[in-house]
Image (cartoon, grey):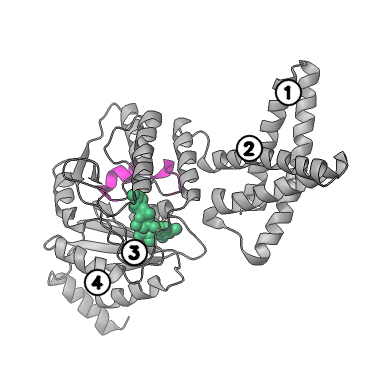
Amino acid sequence: MLAEELESAAVASAAGTWQAPQLAVVVPSYNERENVPLLYEKVTAALAGIPFEFIVVDDNSPDGTAQVVKDMARRHPNVRCLHRIGRRGLSSACIEGIAASAAPFVAVIDADLQHDETILPAMFARAQAGDDIVVGTRYAGSGSAGEGLSSTREAGSRLATRLSALLTGVTLSDPMSGFFLMRRQVFDEVAPTLSEDGFKILLDIIVSATRLRQRKRATLTIGEVPYRFRARHAGESKMSPLIVVQFLGLLLSKLSRGLLPTSFLLFGMVGGSGVFVHLATLWLTHERLGFNFTNAQLAATVVAMTTNFVLNNELTYADKKLHGARFWVGLFSFYAVCSIGALANVSVATWIYETSPDLFLAGIAGAVMSVVFNYSVTRVFTWR
Ligand code: GDD
Ligand code: MN
């Protein structure tokens, strides 16, 4: 910056044209170039009179959303782009966007205009009046899923709400909402315990914050403001069956009180699916293709390791997915680790069987041993 520019910036702040943002509006984005400028206009209109900053967290979208946001940032002092390269994931994007702001209140809103920005002032007012977290809800009062969800997705969303109430004790009307506002202090309290995987950041924040406050014998006040979920403006949804499985992993992880990380549970689920792939290949090659048992077993092992690798790459480590040459290097390191894991499995199982000859106990202990081993080692060597 030139000396004159520095000076004029100092003058601007002395003259009071700059006001510290009271609210950070965090917008996770992936391929949303058509939507972000429109959202900014709408949020600006909605928040008239409230100093806010607009932080878009973009995972290097192929459509060039980050460039569009940076162009906006050249024209508007309250716009910023957090441009993440080689990373993916809605939850981690929200976490990093919130962490990048110093405002006393933070909101998260989708880029695609599905969330009704006109309720932001009401949400902000509730938080200022004392609520710790204020959730935009589609399932209470005048709220509705409107034209925003297909009937299958609405049923799925309601089922997920019930399931999460059952498993975590959260009784909000819409814990699946991606639209919320909170005191930054609440975020600072829970940030170290949040899971980076998946889509369901709000549920994670609420479960973690409730538990933390219970331990401190304090309460967590959650407010709800209803809204009508709109249809996506431009582009398409990034929701997928993989995200649903990641959500199940998150619920189980919270059930274990965070003792078992989501990625470990997903790794375990993938391992479980590998058993079926193994048996199916064994049957196919032996019964249908006439392989002898040893060759059939060998083929089944390779096929199951390969599907496990691909699934872990897509699901467990979707945030650091390996592509191109790194995919192949990763695959071979995965084969190597799993082979050593198999040895660990057999030695532990044998050792247990020798001390107390319980067939199933020994078998399960061996299998658990190899999951733990493969998980820990591939985290270091395969998905670094
Ligand atoms: N940075 C980043 N990285 N942003 C992402 C990613 C990602 O990997 N995946 C999705 N997003 C952004 C999208 O660009 C969008 O702004 C927002 O997150 C929501 O993604 P959508 O793809 O539009 O998801 P949806 O509409 O199917 O799901 C939304 O509604 C659900 C309620 O039914 C989300 O808000 C969910 O959190 C919410 O539960
Ligand atoms: Mn959407």
Q: Residue at x 26, y 82 (%)?
A: 5
Residue sitting at the far front: 288
Image quadrant in which the C terminus is located: bottom right
1 or 4: tag closer to the N-terminus? 4
Q: How far apart are the two marked residues, 4 and 3, measured between alpha carbons?
A: 13 Å
For the N terminus, give its image quadrant.
Answer: bottom left
Above or below for 103 versus 83: above
**Which type of secondary structure does the marked residue at label 3 adopt?**
strand
Residue appearing at x 45%, y 49% in the figure = 198
In this rendering, does residue 302 appear at all? yes
Q: Check if mark 1's residue and mark 4's residue have beta carbons within 8 Å.
A: no
User: Could you say whether the residue bearing mark 4 is in a helix, strand or loop?
Assistant: loop
Q: Which residue is mark 4?
A: 77
| Residue 190 visible to an observer of this rendering | no
Identify which amino acid the numbered label 4 is placed on: Pro
Q: Are marks 4 and 2 in contact (CB under 8 Å)?
A: no
Magenta segment boundaries in residue numbering: 179-198
Per the image, the residue denoted by label 2 is 272
Horizontally, residue 88 falls left or right of residue 361, namely left
Q: Which residue is mark 3?
A: 56
Residue at (52% x, 63% y) in the render: 86
- Look at discs 1 and 2 and give the one toward the viewer: 2
Please state the horizontal and vertical placement of residue 204, each as a whole percent of the image.
38, 41
Residue 294 percent across, percent down from the top left: 87, 41
Kind of residue indicated by mark 2: Gly
Q: Which mark is residue 362?
A: 1
